[in-house]
Image (cartoon, rainbow, N blue to C red):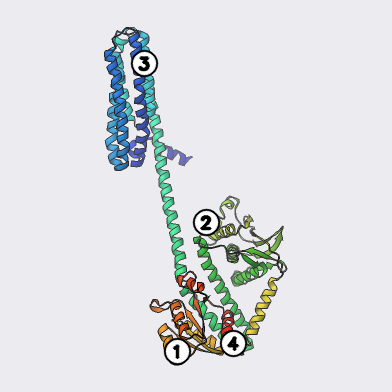
């Protein structure tokens, strides 16, 4: 109520000058066109009275001149309006208002004086009925002008006041026996019509003021939206540009840990090394998810459907969040489908969606834990994430999937984040054509779910996981024989390459540029495998270096190694049939590639 009272007070004494130039111009538009139409109708009424006066036997010569004047006034007003529209489109608003309001006022003044002339021209020549009908016509005409010109009251007063004063002055001669009572009615009518204009003008001013405020809010919203989108674009651009440098240490770390594990002879630290391997894989997965998220946010993701084994997926994601949950004294529980859940979806989008749901659940859960499950629902598989967190209030549930939205309870628990996590989930599900939803009770917890189309398959996720682990154990007992040339300008990464490949039995040479690589080959080093980083110092293209080296060593095999994904050079390399591998590179993947190039023992 207080806010409403303040608002009414704010709008109760508005003036034309309080509006912005745009608002003033809109009022001018609002008044000008109806004013032109009103002036254009007067000649028809004028000649009706000319005909009536002729029937009464009155000399109508001057009256015809009066009617012709209105035809001329209508034509002039139309021309003024056409000129106004052209001037308005070409000139500053201030100049337009200053030039054309006096024009309207001038035409209105001429109209106000001209309306009273028939009383003077026909004084004592026509009947009482003629005069009273004409007086009523003038009253109706003024009322119509009041409605049209109340947007600019001064223009109306230029018509009404001269007309009223002249009528009151001529009334004793026009209506000899009734002028007193008719003057009284004219004064009452004048008070009414002036108040009508005042109220209607305030209404127009309020409307224009509200429109101005709405335009300002819309402009502020547009600018804020552009700023937010630009910030998001800049962040995504930064991640894309910096991905190579960000992946380098993770890439080197994975190689060094594998090298240490190969050299290790102490069984006591073997479990720790396995945990360290898994941790590096988790960092790699989370880092890749971060880059995938930036692509999703910017809308640069192409849908790639494939067969996804859901049990293995949720086990992997639960592993990623195990340490975070343990640090918060929370429990993560998994309920699998019994190795039957295979879905036809985009693996990256689904992985990112579940990661976001798990991150959201752990962030807003202070005690208890999180349950992630896969279960059958009709012909689909449903992935559920339950938590015992703060829940979502009923009034917030309609907006929970909106971008940049975080409710009050979320801000109290954690000020980090931008409210994008669940909006990304919604975007990913819509891209895949999957259903999603949630149920929640405030301070009791939430249940988020995704429903994906099932696919009948014969391979179980557990078999795949076990086979992968079996392959890893087999690789531990295999050695390679041969030579390999590495072109990478990062000393830390070069050390990791040398450490890992030497444990596999590979003779390795690491260089920083294409020039150094050619010098090593010229000295007699004959590589069977060449691995070249894409981004080298001084702007040298790794792909150009690789092609030059393979031309020099036709018996060798080669591949590109890069932390980038959207590089034109990498796309060209793949299109020409070259092998492209991305950092951080899994040691097992690298071993499989090298074993196809070199001799395994």
Q: Which image quarter holds the C terminus?
A: bottom right
Mark positioned earlier in the residue sequence (1 or 2): 2
Distance CA(mark 1)–CA(mark 3): 110 Å
| Left or right of 276 in this view: 511 | left
Residue at x 33%, y 14% (from the top left corner): 50
Relative vertical location of residue 458 with respect to residue 254 in this rendering, above or below:
above
Distance CA(mark 3)–CA(mark 2): 67 Å
Relative image position of residue 391 (x, y in whole percent)? 61, 57
Mark positioned earlier in the residue sequence (1 or 3): 3
Distance CA(mark 1)–CA(mark 2): 55 Å
Closest to the observer, 517 or 498: 517
Residue at x 41%, y 37% (from the top left corner): 207
Number of the front mark, 1 or 3: 1
Closest to the observer, 548 or 75: 548
Picture disc at residue 262? 4
Provide the secondary structure element on which disc 3 rests.
helix
Mark positioned earlier in the residue sequence (2 or 4): 4
Q: Which residue is mark 2?
A: 403
Picture disc at residue 48? 3
Distance CA(mark 2)–CA(mark 4): 47 Å
Provide the secondary structure element on which disc 4 rests.
helix
Q: Which residue is mark 1?
A: 521
């Amino acid at each position: 109520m207080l806010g409403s009272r303040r608002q009414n007070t704010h709008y109760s004494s508005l003036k034309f000058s309080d509006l912005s130039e745009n608002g003033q111009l809109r009022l001018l538009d609002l008044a000008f066109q109806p004013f032109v139409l009103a002036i254009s109708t007067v000649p028809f009424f004028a000649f009706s009275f000319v005909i009536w006066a002729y029937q009464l036997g009155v000399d109508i010569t001057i009256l015809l001149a009066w009617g012709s004047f209105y035809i001329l006034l209508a034509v002039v007003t139309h021309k003024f309006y056409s000129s106004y529209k052209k001037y308005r489109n070409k000139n500053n608003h201030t100049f337009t208002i200053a030039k054309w309001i006096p024009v309207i006022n001038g035409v209105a003044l001429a109209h106000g004086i001209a309306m009273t002339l028939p009383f003077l021209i026909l004084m004592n020549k026509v009947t009482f009925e003629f005069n009273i009908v004409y007086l009523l016509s003038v009253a109706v005409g003024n009322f119509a002008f009041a409605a049209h010109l109340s947007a600019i009251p001064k223009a109306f007063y230029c018509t009404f006041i001269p007309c009223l004063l002249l009528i009151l002055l001529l009334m004793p001669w026009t209506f000899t026996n009734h002028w007193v009572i008719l003057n009284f009615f004219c004064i009452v009518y004048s008070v009414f019509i002036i108040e009508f204009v005042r109220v209607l003008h305030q209404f127009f001013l309020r409307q224009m003021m509200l429109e101005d405020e709405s335009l300002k809010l819309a402009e502020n919203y547009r600018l804020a939206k552009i700023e937010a989108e630009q910030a998001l674009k800049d962040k995504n651009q930064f991640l894309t540009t910096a991905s190579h440098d960000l992946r380098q240490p993770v890439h080197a770390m994975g190689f060094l840990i594998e090298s240490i594990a190969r050299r290790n002879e102490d069984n006591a630290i073997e479990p720790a090394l396995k945990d360290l391997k898994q941790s590096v894989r988790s960092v790699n997965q989370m880092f890749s998810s971060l880059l995938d998220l930036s692509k999703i946010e910017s809308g640069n993701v192409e849908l790639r459907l494939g067969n996804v084994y859901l049990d293995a997926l949720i086990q992997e994601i639960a592993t990623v969040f195990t340490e975070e949950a343990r640090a918060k004294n929370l429990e993560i529980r998994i309920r699998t489908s019994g190795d039957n859940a295979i879905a036809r979806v985009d693996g990256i989008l689904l992985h990112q969606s579940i990661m976001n749901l798990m991150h959201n659940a752990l962030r807003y859960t202070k005690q208890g834990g999180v349950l992630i499950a896969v279960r059958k629902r009709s012909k689909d598989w449903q992935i559920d994430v339950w938590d015992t967190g703060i829940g979502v209030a009923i009034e917030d549930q309609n907006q929970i999937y909106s971008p940049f939205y975080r409710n009050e309870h979320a801000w109290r628990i954690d000020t980090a984040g931008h409210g994008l996590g669940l909006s990304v989930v919604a975007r990913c599900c819509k891209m895949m054509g999957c259903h999603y939803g949630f149920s929640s009770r405030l301070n009791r917890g939430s249940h988020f779910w995704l429903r994906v189309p099932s696919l009948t398959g014969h391979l179980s996720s557990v078999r795949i996981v076990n086979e992968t682990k079996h392959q890893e154990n087999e690789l531990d007992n295999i050695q390679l024989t041969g030579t390999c040339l590495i072109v990478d300008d990062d000393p830390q990464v070069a050390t990791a390459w040398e450490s890992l490949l030497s444990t596999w039995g590979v003779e390795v040479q690491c260089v920083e540029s294409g020039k150094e690589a050619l010098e090593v080959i010229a000295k007699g080093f004959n590589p069977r495998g060449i691995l070249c980083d894409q981004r080298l110092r001084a702007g040298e293209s790794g792909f150009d270096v690789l092609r030059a080296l393979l031309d020099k060593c036709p018996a060798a095999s080669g591949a590109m190694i890069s932390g980038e994904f959207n590089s034109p050079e990498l796309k060209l390399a793949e299109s020409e049939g070259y092998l492209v591998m991305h950092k951080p590179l899994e040691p097992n993947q690298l071993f499989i590639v090298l074993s196809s190039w070199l001799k395994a023992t």
